[in-house]
Amino acid sequence: MEEFFIPKPTRVDYLKAEYGLKSWLLTRDHKRIALLYLYSITFFFLIGSVYAMLIRLELLTPQGDLMQSTTYNKTFTQHGIIMVFFFLIPSIPATLGNFLVPMMIGAKDLAFPRINLLSWYIYLVGGLVTIYALLAGGVDTGWTFYAPFSTTFSNSYVVATGLGIFINGFSSILTGLNFIVTIHTMRAPGMTWFRLPLFIWAHYATSLIMILGTPVIAITILLLAFERFAGIGIFDPAVGGDPVLFQHLFWFYSHPAVYIMVLPGMGVISELIANFSRKNIFGYGFVAFSSLAIAVFGFLVWGHHLFVAGQSIYAGMIFSFLSFAVAIPSAIKVFNWTATLYKASISYETPMLYALGFIGLFTIGGMTGLFLAALATDVHLSDTYFVVAHFHYIMVGGTLLAYLGGLHYWWPKISGRMYPEGWGRFSALVVFVGFNLTFLPQFVMGYMGMPRRYHMYPPEFQVLHVLSTAGASILGVGLLIPVIYLMWSMRYGRIAEANPWHLPGLEWRTQSPPPTENFDVTPVVTWEAYEFAPPEETEVVGTFRE
Amino acid sequence: MTESSVAIDHATSHPALQHHFENMEQQREAGTIGMWVFLVTEIMFFGGMFLAYTLYRSYYPAAFAAASNHLDITLGAINTAVLIVSSFTMALAVYGTQVGRTRMQNICLFLTLVLGLTFLGIKAVEYRSKYEDRLIPGRLIPGREFGPQVAEANDTDPHKLHLRDGASVRQVEMFYWIYFAMTGMHALHMVIGAGLLTVILILSLRGRFSPEYHSPVEISGLYWHFVDIVWIFLFPLLYLLGRHVH
């Protein structure tokens, strides 16, 4: 294996730069803010997982014996809200993105460090307001808040939950704004656009969706809250409002939001595939621009959520066509990743296992999306478990796997310690098996006509539901293992080198963990992305005082 | 230090340079792009309401025209003029900072602030008359629900609502929630802008800005112009459209 430059850890790293609670709560270091986000989204992930387990337990039997229908409605609503708004959307951008965007482009920090910290506090306030709503009595509208049920008929804490999501939206906006400005203005000398790692391209595309989409959901939820609070008929057909307008506004954000979740994951996977194949990525330009294409097309397909909502058939046809079109850039990515693997020297460390799992599961998730984008089949499959399985393949099989893969891959840089490789590989396999066992049966159920959001079902579905619950239990164990050993490794893990994977990226050319300013001196980039050069040609960045 | 590195000497740089920027030019550029990106998010935020306006105007044209007629066009026009002049003084303030004419910079910032507050004052007068005519939508004001007095034929009382054929009071309420949502959100942005200008004015009086360091004034100016432009769209859409159909 070729040797890359390994700087000696001679400077105080960012974890030891300052001590005490105050030094964390008032930090402006993007790396510390990434860790604050890491802890808080893990907390919300655990809450969301508890709701998921409750759902699966209830569905073990055809009778509604664990909870009543209203409790069940609240359980799946709160599972969705917590997972979508407080885990999936911030997951990769706010943790890995926050940590790595400045390091990968050779900057000392994001362009607006104080706004970065502010975004975490906004996230926290939004989260606390939402938790208040859950504790006060919960919300039962589904995470989609469809009017007029949410505005007129629901007897739950819609306004408080909406307020939590409204506040949280601004943390997303500020993160996106910070990334865009940073990538435009803070690149190190020589770091041209086409030398940027694909992780950066993916985050740039994600940020575009964050700044263009999130304000729309903000005003939509605000109007919804006003309607409920003040009895104004904004979306209420009884007084002249249009409930379909709500669905349009909601999905104008919430469909692109799916790409906020999966695009950063694709960025992570591009890094993992190239680096664990020790090969330049196949078709760099195509992969980079497919991220932007997904961001653009993603804004033009929201109408496929309204095929059965009374949207005109002609609008439906156009949205159906555009939804098929968005499969093209996604397929470009999958083909380029697989082409990168061809004749590569692949090694199967934990991050690579997650990456390979991602490719397979994302492909299934994407292909089943085409069933739903087709007008005729969607009428049959709409609001069934087929839809549930489809988007879980994208959100869990895609985003969550990429997040875990990325977390393992950059863990030595983040914590300065190695995770236990054996446990890592084992849990990656457990997650893969558990995930498929949970959601493959749901495709079958959905195809057979099992509708979503019911806590009772005909007994012939029980076998499939039991399989699904069993899979969810395995998945739960598989997700708990990394939580335990990653916390363990922070203290007891083997000390990591600066460049444990022997890679050329900028983030590996500084010590692990990095000093507060990331680099001793501003690096000058003279190499292409993923350039696996012989050691004598790999340039040293910065000097590390002995 | 190797040859592949760039030295930064922060000791000799401008005191306003933050630690993570290489130089003042980079810092200024980051701030400017940041504000532009923020304004894009603002356009999308208002965009949701513009969409609702377009949709409901096409559903209920007669009610929207009647409700439009009930707005005070004189106060609206005065406010439009006030904002346009304030944009002019803001532009002069930015120019003054760039060329180092401190007196002009301070006076223009002050004038902009006064004009902004004038706008808010006139808006408050308008809101008050809507309150008196019971035009606040829904149950927003407890104990004073939406319930305007509807004029009979040949009744010219300006405080009564003159409905057109095919328009109902409910449809007029749709206009008024849009009116209050849009102008209210705009007024909130004006309040934030006035706060921003106050801070900038205080810093300016303390001599913080110079031709070398003027980006905070410039960036606040961008925000101020944006809020003005929103009003430039709101005024014709809410006050003027459909008014000629008498």
Image: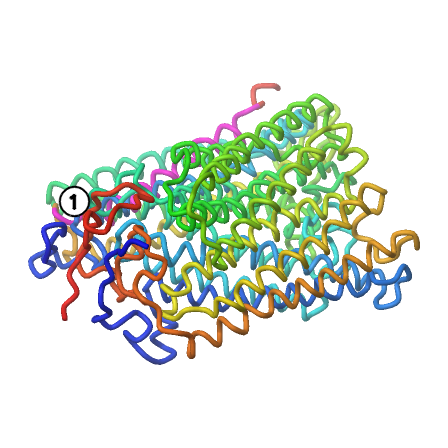
Q: Considering the numbered disc 1 on the image, is that residue within a helix, a strand or a loop?
A: helix
Image quadrant in which you'd find residue B71: top right
Residue A291: x %, y % from top left: 46, 37
> Mark 1 highlights which residue?
B97
Q: Identify the subunit bearing mark 1.
A: B
Left or right of residue B48, residue A304 in this image = right
Q: Main secondary structure of the magenta part?
A: helix
Residue at 64% across / 63% down in the picture?
A48
Can you say which quadrant of the picture contains the N terminus of chain B? bottom left
Name the foreground residue: A449 vs A544. Answer: A544
Q: Position of residue A486 (x, y in %)?
A: 49, 71
Which residue is outermost to the top?
B245
In the displayed structure, would residue A482 be above or below residue B204?
A: below
Viewer-nearest residue: A418 or B4: A418
Question: Is residue B139 among what the camera can see?
Answer: yes
Residue at 66 percent of width and 50 percent of height: A392
Question: Residue A522's x, y, as percent?
Answer: 19, 54
The residues colored magenta run: B212-241
| Magenta-colored stretch includes residue B228 | yes
Q: Single out the residue that lies furthest toward the left.
A: B12
Q: Nearer the viewer, residue A91 or B156?
A: A91
Q: Quadrant of residue B78?
A: top left
The residue lying at 45 percent from left, 64 percent from top is A121
Label tally: 1
Q: Is residue A303 above or below residue A504?
A: above
Q: Residue at x 54, y 66 (%)?
A: A42
Crowding at mark 1 (Cα within 10 Å: few <14, some 14-19, many 20+) = many
Say what amino acid the circle numbered 1 marks. Thr
Inspect this view and state whether residue B115 appears. Answer: no
